[in-house]
Image: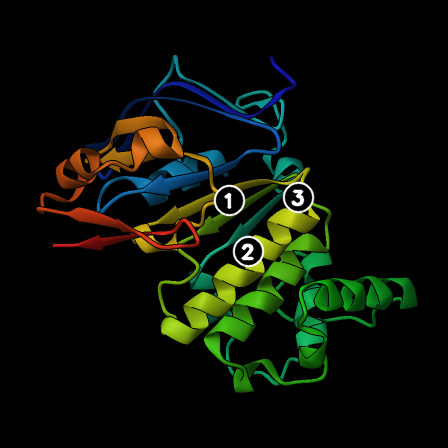
């Protein structure tokens, strides 16, 4: 066990529905790193996340350690409280109840989407501080159903931070957002990375332009295999992207360091 590592996976093969979805994955992420996972639909990104959360299990003989806890000898419910998971699926769970931004933020303490009890004053103060830190204090009294998708994601990030997580997994958080909403979200993630240097961030996407320069290490998945892994510059090459997406991709670099794919 290496306490420097937030994630350590060795020889992980995962079968789902009688089919091998991940093939012998070996992957290490150190604590405090900002890491991206890029891949087309069906590459295995979601299965990898499910495995890290203990919702999908590799074949016997694999090693999976998250935050110093080795799977097979850890209480997963306790471990999950140390992990913040942001997924577009959570948008659907908000439903049409008139929860306010503050109530949804507070619900992170109970692992629910929406508040079902009277919060204590110190809990409210913490939720308000988080919303302020994310420049979302104006959403505190707003009904979530009246917010844009980008604003909802901000509230969900504040909700995830209520438990002081050590690892945050952003699982394609911009998939349902328009251009303005996506840029709003990416600015929030950049600010979060600055404010919480101790927080390990994993960003999953299929969009190259979403990978902010703050994500300085990563990997590309293709059909359940790691096609490339290492530093940002080592991984995000035209050759790797062409193999990952089977398209004649060329890369353009913006002044802010972001990459854009063109044909």
Q: Residue 115 location, x and y as percent?
A: 70, 71
| The N terminus, quarter of image | top right
Closer to the N terminus: mark 2 or mark 3?
3
Q: Please name which of the two marks, 2 or 3, marks the residue nearer to the observer.
A: 2
Look at the image and tell me whether residue 31 can be seen: yes
Q: Quadrant of residue 128?
A: bottom right
Q: Residue at x 66, y 85 (%)?
A: 142
* Residue that carries the numbered disc 2 in the rendered image: 189
Q: Residue 80 location, x and y as percent?
A: 61, 41
* Residue that carries the numbered disc 1 in the rendered image: 214
Q: Secondary structure at mark 3?
A: loop
* Residue that carries the numbered disc 3 in the rendered image: 81
Q: CA distance from mark 1 to mark 3?
A: 25 Å
Q: Residue 141 location, x and y as percent?
A: 72, 84
Closer to the N terminus: mark 1 or mark 3?
3
- Marks 2 and 1 in Cβ contact (< 8 Å): yes
Q: Residue 58 location, x and y as percent?
A: 37, 25
Q: Secondary structure at mark 2?
A: helix
Q: Quadrant of residue 39?
A: top left
- Marks 1 and 3 in Cβ contact (< 8 Å): no
């Amino acid at each position: 066990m290496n306490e420097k590592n937030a994630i350590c996976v060795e020889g992980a093969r995962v079968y789902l529905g009688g089919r091998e979805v991940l093939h012998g994955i070996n992957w290490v992420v150190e604590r405090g790193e900002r890491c991206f996972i890029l891949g087309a639909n069906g590459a295995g990104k979601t299965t990898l996340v499910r495995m890290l959360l203990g919702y999908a299990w590799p074949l016997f003989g694999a090693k999976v350690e998250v935050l110093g806890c080795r799977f097979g000898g850890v209480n997963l419910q306790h471990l999950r409280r140390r992990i913040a998971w942001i997924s577009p699926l959570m948008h659907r769970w908000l439903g049409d109840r008139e929860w306010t931004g503050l109530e949804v933020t507070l619900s992170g303490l109970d692992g629910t989407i929406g508040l079902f009890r009277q919060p204590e004053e110190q809990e409210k103060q913490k939720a308000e501080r988080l919303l302020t830190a994310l420049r979302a204090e104006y959403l505190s009294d707003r009904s979530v159903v009246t917010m844009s998708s980008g604003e909802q994601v901000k509230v969900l990030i504040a909700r995830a931070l209520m438990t002081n997580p050590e690892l945050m997994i952003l699982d394609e958080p911009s998939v349902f957002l328009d251009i303005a909403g996506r840029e709003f979200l990416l600015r929030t993630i950049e600010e979060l990375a600055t404010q919480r240097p101790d927080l390990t961030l994993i960003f999953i996407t299929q969009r190259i332009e979403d990978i902010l320069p703050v994500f300085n290490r990563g990997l590309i998945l293709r059909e359940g295999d790691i096609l490339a892994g290492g530093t940002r510059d080592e991984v995000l090459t035209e050759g790797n992207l062409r193999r990952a997406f089977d398209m004649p991709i060329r890369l353009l670099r913006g002044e802010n360091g972001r990459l854009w794919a063109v044909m």
